[in-house]
């Protein structure tokens, strides 16, 4: 579904991604793990058109994404939950969700999707009138995933959904990710929390200072001695 | 009550403040969404005045129209013209520099402003000299108690500003575009990820801000009936100071700042006309020293 080949991204003179390649087949959960500064966020931002690659190709459902603008990707079917959630702080929870329906012309359809988010995340439903900025970290993460559900992509990019959450909440969020995947959404999950990510993923890639190095089925990657040492702490 | 502090001055101050408010809103909206101080904004106000002036002569000659319908037509045309010029300015001058260092846009803004002013001065049917603005509507004084009157012009200025500001409030609070404008001003990347065409939202913001300045141009033309291509500089500067006073980027702040500015200037002028001219700058200095983020401005707002 998504294919990234030899991707390079520079920030000025700093090369953040030097050679990143991976495949995301439809219907699967793919984990991209790596430590701080490895280039995970940059990879997702490049897929979403927020950073301009200086080399390599990104294609989605056979279409080359070069030159496609970020906001157009939503219509093509890519939803992105960014690092740090990026909830609009002075918009209410409902307004945050409504805006995610920007590309959906049919107002009834937007309503239906928002209701779906509410059944999926009852805690979000309880806080519809609250300002986004006043939600707890966990609630913000749920709202961020909820917004992505309203945008309605077939491919969901998740940037460290576990960041800053208590273990119980991490489990809850990861359960929801699996549930979304069962409903048919393909998932590219970026995580530092390698253990949890490898636990739910089908395939996994390790990203090290701008290069994709180890890859394979999530189980094989989890059994890899290097991964066990560097990312799983065993 | 001394002779200076009277009801008449308050009325005049609110009238002037209404015009400042309409200009200040565009400054603050554009700043809020792209963090740019659009120095050409005062020129959109001038364009509104000239459009109304042209519209009046055209329609008056062709249709023989005048009075309220004429004023309404002139208002719509002034808003359209200024809105379109604002839109074009954004598209041609600011958009190509959007992700470049801020200083380039700032310098460009000054250049655009001068370009518009000198272009208008050079145009044969406009020219550099003062023109008398026609009396589209007669100004009839209405008694307000013992010592004060309010003119129909003042009522129109205050009324038009109020209607436009209420409209803007509804737009920003309750429409999808308004929500998108708030979202874009908070986080452009996140807005893009929602599928929002950020450039389109920015374009709308410029257009609405420009249209408001255009309306102010017409009202100012009617109220202070002398127009010239550089007429936008001072009111633009004062409206900008009003926006800073209220907290740049903050919509209610711009309105509040503008009315404070209008009333302060009127009182100061009544005392001494030089003081009236200078009070805006005195206010600016005090604000920058005492509360740089402005009355309603947010704590973390970064100023250029
Ligand atoms: N806007 C930027 N300007 C300059 N360098 C940047 C920028 N964003 C990221 N970088 C650099 O690019 C490299 C990759 O950063 P990136 O944010 O993609 O890492 P990451 O894997 O997401 O890390 P983390 O787990 O901490 O979120 C880092 O060295 C970082 O300092
Ligand atoms: Mg990151």
Image (tube, rainbow, N blue to C red):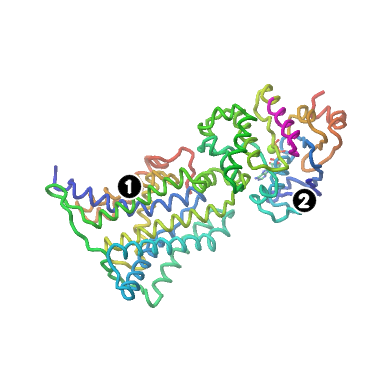
Residue A208: give x, y in percent of width and height.
79, 39
Query: Rounded to the nearest whole Å, what is the CA distance between mark 2 and mark 1?
Result: 56 Å
Q: Chain of mark 2?
A: A
Residue indicated by mark 1: B283
User: Residue at coordinates 61% horizontally, 44% vertically from top-left?
Assistant: B194
Image point (32%, 65%), residue name = B70
Task: Give, as a single range, the part of the protein colored magenta.
Answer: A172-190
User: The residue marked by circle 1 belongs to what chain?
Assistant: B
Residue located beneath label 2 in the image = A59
* Label 2 Cα crowd, 10 Å radius (few <14 / some 14-19 / many 20+): some
Towards the viewer: B92 or A171: A171
Callout 1: CB less than 8 Å from ligand 1: no
In this view, B153 is above or below B227: above
Residue reaching furthest bottom? B124
Q: How many marks?
A: 2
The answer to if A233 sits in the magenta stretch is: no
Local SS, label 2: strand
């Amino acid at each position: 579904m998504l294919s990234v080949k030899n991707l390079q991204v520079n920030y000025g003179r700093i090369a953040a991604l030097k050679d990143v390649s991976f495949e995301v087949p439809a219907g699967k959960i793919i984990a991209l793990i790596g430590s701080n500064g490895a280039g995970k966020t940059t990879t997702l931002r490049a897929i979403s058109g927020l950073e301009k690659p200086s080399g390599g190709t990104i294609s989605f459902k056979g279409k080359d994404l070069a030159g496609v603008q970020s906001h157009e990707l939503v219509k093509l079917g890519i939803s992105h939950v960014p690092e740090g959630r990026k909830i609009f702080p002075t918009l209410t929870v409902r307004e945050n969700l409504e805006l995610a329906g920007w590309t959906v012309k049919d107002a009834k359809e937007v309503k239906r999707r928002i209701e779906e988010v509410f059944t999926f995340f009852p805690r979000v439903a309880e806080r519809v009138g609250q300002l986004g900025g006043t939600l707890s970290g966990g609630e913000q993460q749920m709202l961020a995933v909820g917004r992505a559900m309203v945008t309605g992509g077939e491919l969901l990019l998740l940037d460290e959904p576990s960041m800053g959450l208590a273990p119980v909440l991490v489990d809850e969020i990861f359960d929801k990710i699996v549930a979304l995947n069962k409903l048919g959404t393909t998932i590219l999950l970026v995580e530092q929390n390698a253990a949890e990510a490898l636990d739910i993923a089908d395939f996994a890639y390790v990203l090290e200072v701008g290069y994709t190095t180890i890859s394979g089925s999530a189980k094989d990657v989890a059994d890899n001695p290097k991964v066990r040492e560097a990312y799983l702490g065993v | 009550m001394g002779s200076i502090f009277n009801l008449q001055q308050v009325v005049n101050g609110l009238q002037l403040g209404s015009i400042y408010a309409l200009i200040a809103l565009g400054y603050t909206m554009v700043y809020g969404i792209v963090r740019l101080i659009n120095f050409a904004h005062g020129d959109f106000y001038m364009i509104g005045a000239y459009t109304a002036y042209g519209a009046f002569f055209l329609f008056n000659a062709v249709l023989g129209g005048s009075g309220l319908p004429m004023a309404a037509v002139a208002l719509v045309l002034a808003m359209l013209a200024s809105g379109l010029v604002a839109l074009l300015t954004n598209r041609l001058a600011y958009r190509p520099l959007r992700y470049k260092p801020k200083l380039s846009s700032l310098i460009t803004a000054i250049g655009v402003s001068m370009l518009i002013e000198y272009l208008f001065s050079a145009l044969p049917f406009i020219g550099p000299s003062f023109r008398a603005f026609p009396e589209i509507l007669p100004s009839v004084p209405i008694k307000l108690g013992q010592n004060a009157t309010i003119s129909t012009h003042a009522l129109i200025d205050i009324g038009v500003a109020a209607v436009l500001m209420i409209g803007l409030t509804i737009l920003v609070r309750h429409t999808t575009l308004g929500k998108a404008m708030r979202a874009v001003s908070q986080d452009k990347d996140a807005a893009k990820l929602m599928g929002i065409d950020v450039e389109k939202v920015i374009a709308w913001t410029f257009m609405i801000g420009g249209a408001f300045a255009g309306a102010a141009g017409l009202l100012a033309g009617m109220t202070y009936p002398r127009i010239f291509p550089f007429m936008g500089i001072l009111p633009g500067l004062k409206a900008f100071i009003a926006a800073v006073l209220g907290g740049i980027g903050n919509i209610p702040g711009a309105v509040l700042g503008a009315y404070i500015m209008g009333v302060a200037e009127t009182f100061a002028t009544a005392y001494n006309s030089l003081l009236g001219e200078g009070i805006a700058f005195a206010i600016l200095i005090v604000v920058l020293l005492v509360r740089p983020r402005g009355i309603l401005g947010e704590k973390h707002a970064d100023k250029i």
